[in-house]
Image (cartoon, grey):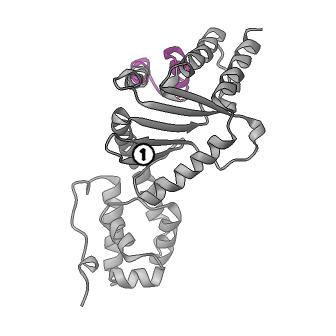
Amino acid sequence: MGTPMDAAPEQHDNEDSARGALGSTLRYLREKAGKSLSQLAEETNYDKSYLYRLEAAERISKRPVMEDLDTYYGTGDVLVRLWKLARMEAFVDHYKAFMRLEATANVMHMYTPVIPGLLQTEAYARVLLSMWPQRDEDELEEQVVARIGRQELLHRKPRPTVRAIIDEAALRRSVADPKVWEDQLTHLIFSAAQPSITVQVLPFSAGVVPVPGGSLHLLWQPDGGSVAYLEGSSSGDLLDEPEDILKYRLAYDRIRDVALTPLDSVMFIERILEEHRS
């Protein structure tokens, strides 16, 4: 007798989304093949509950899973192509959820290979955002306003505790306008002087460290809840499973251990500023 999990997943409100389309396609292919979830799990070596959540559009897998299932069903790259659309959709959804959590977090730890948005000047943010292709002036201004508007959370009461570890590479890539870059470095030094903000630099001299492929944010809420957010150039993952949060918290701790101290970091940025002025 089949278990409830062997039945077809219920339809969800996101059935018209890319994630919903992927889930429906996975379910269709399994049923067309005459397989139960239990049989599919046994033949593919993936956990049955995991496969169920994919079909129910509750999770987005990693690409190798879709490649395996494309091979299993003989569907070429159909599932991989649907997965790409679902990932982009999830990136937008996860980023919106991240910003909602960021707005209420009382502790924020971040590692970024670029100067984090919360510590950017308006002029510097405009330069970075203008680099995206096919973005008109109105859209650019909306993006700048949205990014700078996020910084209001740094001034709420009580102020959140923020620790930002910035890769040295971000401090070595100046923008074309010398005044914009000087103001940005000055703003970083000013931010680091605030009691609620700690800035550290991860120097090249630290060598190879276990940094993620993009930015890593760890957020803690007043009720003790926490999340990890990983952001790359075209993907974003919001993780709330305890084992995931612990893994990335330990990774962050290792990065912090080899970063310059807060005092040395400010002195480092001041030296770069002086080099720029000279």
Q: Main secondary structure of the magenta part?
A: helix
Quadrant for the C terminus, please: top right
* Residue 23, percent from left and from top: 33, 64
Classed neighbour count for the residue bearing mark 1: other residues with Cα under 10 Å, few (<14), some (14–19), many (≥20): some
- Residue shown at 66% from the left, 11% from the top: 178
- Residue shown at 39% from the left, 53% from the top: 240
Which residue is most to the bottom? 1
Please provide the residue range marked out in magenta. Answer: 121-143
* Residue 159, percent from left and from top: 39, 26
**Where on the picture, by quarter, is residue 48?**
bottom left
**In the rendered view, would you say 250 is above or below 134?**
below
Taking depth in this image into account, of 76 and 5 the one nearest to the observer is 5
* Residue 135, percent from left and from top: 46, 25
Quadrant for the N terminus, please: bottom left
In the image: residue 274, left or right of residue 266: right
- Residue shown at 56% from the left, 15% from the top: 190
Can residue 251 be seen by looking at this rendering?
yes
In the image: residue 178, left or right of residue 232: right
**Tag 1: amino acid:** Phe
**Where on the picture, by quarter, is residue 170?**
top right
**In the rendered view, would you say 72 is above or below 59?**
below
**Where on the picture, by quarter, is residue 274?**
top right
In the image: residue 170, left or right of residue 141: right
Q: Which residue is mark 1?
A: 91
